[in-house]
Image (cartoon, rainbow, N blue to C red):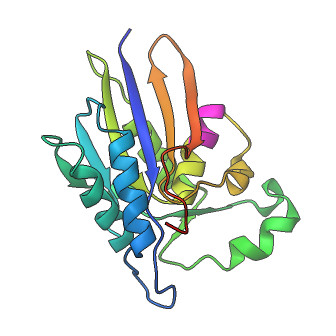
């Protein structure tokens, strides 16, 4: 049966956290380049990225190692943070954090992310793959979905900058988490 594999890459380290849309630091550019080298043999249909500058720049560095793969900005992988509709569904220790989520990033009930996962997980007539440059919470939500974990469980699924997570959907078996937060390719922060 055909499968869909997602290679999820968290954007490289960004600088200027006082800015609303910071770009990559020098180390972030090295992380992005290293992730591209790690994925250079992937046969993917597209490289999707969010509209945030750090994701666009990371995708540009990955694209140098993935010639011929279309690079596409996608609303499906935008920087979103799920916030609960029902606060009793989330352990109280996370309430303060979730109440501080900026309105432009908040995804009530995770509905936008659920819709994105459904679309990203759709299989076609043949095996295919996508490389996706996105954000920590988006990757956490996708992994939580694959594992069918409780709604709030994405919160503790941390991705390192430039790390790779691989998930797969197939029409004849449950979704699979193949690799989580793979970082063997990443440069030393001091380099």
Q: Is residue 120 magenta?
A: no
Please state if 124 lies on the left or on the right of 185 as rendered.
Answer: left
Please state if 92 lies on the left or on the right of 185 as rendered.
Answer: right
Measuring from the top left, give residue 114's x and y in whole percent.
51, 46
Which residue: 27% across, 46% down? 47
Up/down of 66 relative to 169, above or below: below
Which residue: 43% across, 59% down? 31
- Image quadrant in which the N terminus is located: top left
Up/down of 6 relative to 9, above or below: above
Occupied quadrant, residue 61: bottom left
Measuring from the top left, give residue 101's x and y in whole percent.
61, 76
Q: Between 161 and 20, which is closer to the camera in this rendering?
A: 161
Q: Between 168 and 35, which is closer to the camera in this rendering?
A: 35
Which range is magenta? 143-147
Measuring from the top left, give residue 132's x and y in whole percent.
37, 47
Which residue: 68% across, 61% down? 84
């Amino acid at each position: 049966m055909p499968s869909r594999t997602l290679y999820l890459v968290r954007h490289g380290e960004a600088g200027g956290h006082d800015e609303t849309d910071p770009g990559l630091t020098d180390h972030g550019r090295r992380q992005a380049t290293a992730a591209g080298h790690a994925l250079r043999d992937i046969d993917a249909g597209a490289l999707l990225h969010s509209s945030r500058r750090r994701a666009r720049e990371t995708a540009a560095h990955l694209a140098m190692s993935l010639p011929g793969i279309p690079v596409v900005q996608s609303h499906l992988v935008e920087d979103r943070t799920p916030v609960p509709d029902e606060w009793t569904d989330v352990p109280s220790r996370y309430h303060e954090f979730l109440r501080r989520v900026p309105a432009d990033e908040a995804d009530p009930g995770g509905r936008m992310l659920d819709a994105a996962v459904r679309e990203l997980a759709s299989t076609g007539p043949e095996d295919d793959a996508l490389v996706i440059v996105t954000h920590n919470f988006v990757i956490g939500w996708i992994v939580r979905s694959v594992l069918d974990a409780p709604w709030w469980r994405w919160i503790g699924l941390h991705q390192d900058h430039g790390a790779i997570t691989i998930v797969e959907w197939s029409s004849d078996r449950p979704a699979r988490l193949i690799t989580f937060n793979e970082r063997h390719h990443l440069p030393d922060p001091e380099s």
